[in-house]
Every structure is written in C-alpha cells, then in structure tokens.
Amino acid sequence: MAWQRVMALADLADGEMRQFPRANGEFLVCRMEDAVYALDNECPHAGGPLAMGNFSPPLIACPWHAWEFDCRTGECVHSAKAKVAQYPTEVRGDELWVDVPEPTANEDA
Ligand code: FES
C-alpha cells in the first residue's frame, strides 16, 4: 500500500463521489457529511465502474446492474458474499490522502 494525495478536501462536497487512477485500476472517494471513504472502483459482481453509478449516501449503486454498496463498509446490501475493497483515508491539513495498493511484481504500474 502507498499513500497517495488525491485532492483538496474542500473540492469534495457532501454527497459527491469521484474516481481516480491507481496502479492497475481505479478507486473512488466519496463524502458523507464530514466523513470521507475510499473504495475500489470495480464492482465485485461483474466489474462495473462504481463511480459512474449513483451515490445516495450511504449507498453507491453500480451503473450496470444496480447492486448497492454501503460506502462505510464496502458491503453489498443484496449479497453477503459481495464486498468492495476499502482503502484507508487520511486528511492532512486540507488535503485528502488515500492508502492505495501498489502494483505487484508481475503488473505494470
Ligand atoms: S457489475 Fe455491478 S451490479 Fe453488476
């Protein structure tokens, strides 16, 4: 894992969700009141881009088949077996940082 500066916290409004690149994929950040969460952007059902879906705090709805995930836990409300990976977030000053996975030795950055 590696901490990555993402954005100014003031640029992420309550109820907003945004997508960012990481090594070998993307992640999303979303804000619910004063809390900020970071999750992988790939839906565990069939790979849909979650950040392209609807965010109605605390639920993120996948744009492909409408499965919903709780941004606070990554858990799917429709299937106990489906869960989106969460990444730690940290606010440093007025900036949002996320601890995202690093590429493995067999993957390109
Ligand atoms: S790919 Fe996300 S619900 Fe099917």
Image (cartoon, rainbow, N blue to C red):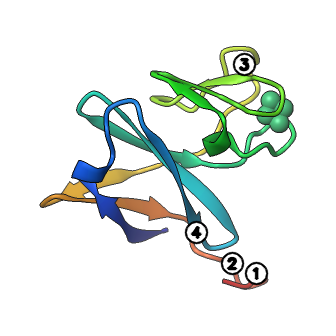
**Which residue is labeled 3 in the image?**
80
Alpha-carbon distance for marks 3 and 1? 30 Å
Task: Find out whether the residues at labels 4 and 1 contact each other: C-beta distance under 8 Å.
Answer: no
Q: Residue at x 60, y 45 (%)?
A: 85
Alpha-carbon distance for marks 1 and 2? 5 Å
Q: Is mark 2 within 8 Å of ligand 1?
A: no
Q: Mark 2: give few (<14), some (14-19) or many (20+) Cα within 10 Å.
A: few
Tell me where residue 41 appears, x and y as whole percent. 64, 49
Please, what is the three-letter code of the amino acid marked with disc 1?
Glu
**Which residue is labeled 4 in the image?**
22
Tell me where residue 29 appears, x and y as whole percent. 46, 47
Please, what is the three-letter code of the amino acid marked with disc 4?
Arg
Q: Mark 3: give few (<14), some (14-19) or many (20+) Cα within 10 Å.
A: few
Alpha-carbon distance for marks 4 and 1? 12 Å
Report the disc number at residue 107: 1
Q: Residue at x 31, y 39 (%)?
A: 13
Please, what is the three-letter code of the amino acid marked with disc 3?
Ala
> What quarter of the picture does the C terminus occupy?
bottom right
Tell me where residue 73 appears, x and y as whole percent. 50, 29
**What element does badge 3 sit on?**
loop
Along the line of sight, which residue is nearer the eye, 42 or 102?
A: 42
Q: Residue at x 50, y 49 (%)?
A: 18
Please, what is the three-letter code of the amino acid marked with disc 2?
Thr
**What element does badge 4 sit on?**
strand
Q: Quadrant of residue 44?
A: top right
**Which residue is labeled 2 in the image?**
104
Locate ligand 1 by image quadrant: top right
